[in-house]
Image (spheres, rainbow, N blue to C red):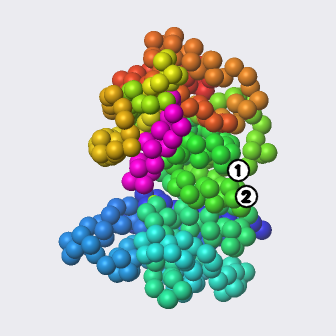
Amino acid sequence: MVKKVLKFGGTSVGTIERIQHVANIIKKEHTAGNKVIAVVSAMAGKTNELVKLSNEISEEFNKRELDVLLSSGEQVTCALLSGALIKLNLKAKSWLNWQIPILTDGEHTNSRIINMHIEKINKFLDDKGIVIIPGFQGISKNGDVTTIGRGGSDATAVAVAKIFNADKCEIYTDVDGVYSTDPNKIPVAKKIDKISYDEMLELSSLGAKVMQPSAVQTAMMYDIPLEVRSTFTERKGTKIFSEENIDYSKSVTGVAYSKDDAKITITGVEDRPGVAANIFEPLSKAQINVDMVIQNISSDAKTTDITFTVKRDDIFKTKEILNKSNKIHYKDIIQNDKVAKVSIVGAGMVSTPGVTYRMFRALSDEKINILAISTSEIKLSVIIDESNILKAIKKLHTTFDLD
Ligand code: ASP
Ligand code: MG
């Protein structure tokens, strides 16, 4: 007998028909002899709707009350799903966060799950019951209802899998897995059967938004195998686990991209110790995330140019801070906010020489100019002109045998 955590996202439970469909998926698992704990999100759009309602009262709606409000979306789904299972003559029961309880730590709207009581739920599972748990929430030491950050149901599912010592954690969603690149842009994109936590994190933080990255991180920490799969097809999904489980026949697993980047070059800054720190310290204090940094060799040994990238939304603030700082002396600030980042990701890279030059050659064959480069053990990213992004993804996808 296998103990499984099945997590159903907002679109999977977006309508009554879909909830009934989910009930049938659970019924199949249960009939196959598995112990099932289902973790559910609010019906699609529900949480946003509740946020909007609170804004109508006040833009600074009380955070404690906001948590009470937002957590209600998942409660609705829990009851409807459990009711649908009971209608199918199954033994099912929903629990609210404080009835379990799911214990959390931290601030309202941004708490963290630290533990759960498992006895009564395990007893119910032993008695062949199906358990329904609300994602995205818990209860604080003071007994207040809390939520754990938007998109937090993935994190709940992983926490439940860990604390209940489940054998599997399956994330049911509206796509049938993780793809080698964006299938909406590149029709030849392929579904990846197996991927490591590290690769998944690189791909998801780069824009392949299938699962909440922090939930993947937790799964990696505790080595909880995940599977992302579609609620709407029977197809196998993508398995996410540690690298040892994967045979790397290819050097590159996927091509990711992000479009909302901007590049800033500061020319004529002094070439002496402390200058880079003076530039980036105030940016970090203002919560501006700097991604790539390049410093050119100074030709006159006195001044140099520093180029870096930030999110496009941050460009105005970045320039303002640089302008204001009296610790930084420079000639000019040049910005380019029409840039994009394209990355190849693959744990197979580590053992394959020549990946770097093949990427650069492929881009040059397409006459695509590289504006900045950064590398890590399993990732190679370049900044290019935004207008070239589709051409670049296509070419790299082909070059690394992903089509
Ligand atoms: N319902 C919550 C949200 O929309 C949590 C989730 O769906 O994961 O953010
Ligand atoms: Mg969600």
Asked which secondary structure carries label 2, the reply is loop
The residue that mark 2 highlights is: 223
The reply to whether discs 1 and 2 touch (Cβ–Cβ < 8 Å) is yes
Task: State how many labels appear.
Answer: 2
Residue 294: image location, x then y, percent = 51, 30
Q: Residue at x 48, y 18 (%)?
A: 300
Residue 196: image location, x then y, percent = 68, 45
Residue 231 visible: no
Ligand 1 within 8 Å of disc 1? The answer is no
Asked which secondary structure carries label 1, the reply is strand
Q: Residue at x 30, y 45 (%)?
A: 324
Residue 348: image location, x then y, percent = 72, 33
> Does residue 253 belong to the magenta stretch?
no
The magenta span reads: 272-295
Query: Which of 8 and 270 lies nearest the eye of the viewer?
Result: 270
Callout 1 amino acid: Phe
**Circle 2 residues within 10 Å: few <14, some 14–19, many ≥20:** some
Q: Is residue 345 left or right of 353 when viewed as pictured?
A: left
Residue 47 visible: yes
The residue that mark 1 highlights is: 241
Picture quadrant where residue 367 is located: top left
Callout 2 amino acid: Asp
Q: Is residue 385 above or below residue 328?
A: above
> Does residue 275 belong to the magenta stretch?
yes
Query: Which of 2 and 208 lies nearest the eye of the viewer?
Result: 208
Q: Residue at x 67, y 81 (%)?
A: 118
